[in-house]
Image (tube, rainbow, N blue to C red):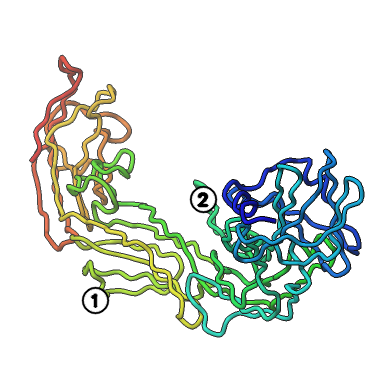
Amino acid sequence: MTRKTFLFCFIFGCLSSPVFSQSLTFSGNSLKVLEETPEKSTGLEKIYVLYSTEGVTASYTSSEGNRIHWLQYGNLGGGHAEEVSSTQDGNTSILSFLEGDKGYIVEDGDRRYCFWITNYLPHRLKLQSAAPAIDEECGVTVIDVVGVGDPIRYFTVNGMQKTLNQDITIEYSTQEWNGGSNHTNFEDIEVVKKFESLQSQYRLSPPNYCRTIFKISGDKFLKEWNWEESVETSIIDPSSVDARTFAIQLTGSSEDESIALEGSNQIGSGKQDGLGGSAPCEIRFEAYVTDGIVHHEWQLTRDVSFNEIDYRFTQQDLDYTFMEEGTHYLRYLGSNSDGSCEYISDVYEVMIGESALKIPNAFSPNGDGVNDEWKVAYRSLMNFQCSIFDRQGHQVCHLTSPDQGWDGKVGGKTVDSGVFYYVIEATGTDGKKYKKSGDINIVKFVGRNGTSSGNEQ
């Protein structure tokens, strides 16, 4: 052929037609010829994978009775294709000496078809063993594989090198956060990873968060021929760790906070969101972890940088009551058996307000649902004692918690309007002492707006 013919094919490319695949046949092969359809940008109609090209011939039949020409190219692309010898019997042209790992161009009149022939045998995959890498890494599992099987390369019509995807498969178990609203736990899942070709080492993410066996198998061509190779590791302990943490406030939240306890009479700490409020403030901290975490530690400090730790708690879940005014910081650390892999949670900020006490001097226990109970407003109080007396000095009510209140009843009956007297002693969690006394005015009438007024002391 002339140089002009080569340039025409190289510059203008090869035509694509479903008839082409039907016109091209192979004979002399003991195993099925496998077909791959590459991207159009390669200029190739098909990639044919033959287990071995030895003794195989290729035949092409022209539907128009044209004289067929076969051209072959290598890593330089179709622009450097050279004609190869073939024989023609009627409309069918036969290429008797089919060479593998080569590109071919069939000229059928003014039509040209390009394809690649892969001789699989020289690249045949053979797997021998698999084991975890000696040097483990946190956050990734590294598996060493012993075997043979070169990557299968091919060249486009323009001479670009590509790799044929062999689908080397790695299967193993790990754990995944279920993502549910109840944050119940991590769930076991099966992972399937696919790789283009055999590697001596595979870096896998997600890593194995639980004990598992890694199975390496392949490739897809051997699988089609029912000769798939596979190897397995021994049971491998988790190489990495993961966790999720949550905080649930049980007591001590304030009315002005988004996590306020319903019906609370606590004075806000000035915080608009987050954890904390009034002491004693009990918060439950929960950690949900993968199987690899065996050491647990909650760290509590006043130092936001955590350079100095005030308390360490070596349990998975922590119930803690905050008593001291100020800002507290807490985080969770979980690690594997040798401490080589560690999970550190986000920092929880807990703000506890200084103690405070406000006392109303009137209420109206008339059953209208408004101001029917006498109750103090407070923040961060403990050791609370309150006695209420009538005009004759008889005690009519005794309260032992600032959460408690008086409904204006004595012996199950609401008292008459009048003046009563209270005495309060309490201690703030910040050490401040409170000794208060004063009048309580009981008003039975209902004002225009349906409420009874009363000032705070």
Seen in the picture, residue 197 relative to 43 is either above or below; the reply is below
How far apart are labels 1 and 2 at the CA level?
A: 34 Å
Where's residue 386, x and y in %?
A: 19, 48
- Residue 382, picture quadrant: bottom left
Numbered disc 1: secondary structure: loop
Q: Residue at x 29, y 56 (%)?
A: 281
The quarter of the picture where the C terminus appears is top left
Looking at the rendered structure, the kind of residue marked 1 is Glu
Callout 2: few (<14), some (14-19), or many (20+) C-alpha neighbours within 10 Å?
Answer: few
Q: Residue at x 59, y 64 (%)?
A: 76
- Position of 38 with respect to 319 (left or right) is right
Looking at the rendered structure, the kind of residue marked 2 is Gly
Tell me the tag on residue 308.
1
Name the residue nearer the viewer: 116 or 164.
116
Where's residue 346, x and y in %?
A: 35, 61
The quarter of the picture where the N terminus appears is bottom right
- Residue 195, picture quadrant: bottom right
Tell me the tag on residue 361.
none
Seen in the picture, residue 190 relative to 292 is either above or below; the reply is above
Name the residue nearer the viewer: 354 or 337.
337
Where's residue 36, x and y in %?
A: 72, 54
Tell me the tag on residue 179.
2
Where's residue 49, x and y in %?
A: 77, 61
User: Which residue appears farthest toward the front when viewing the image?
Assistant: 2
Dot 1 or dot 2, earlier in sequence: 2
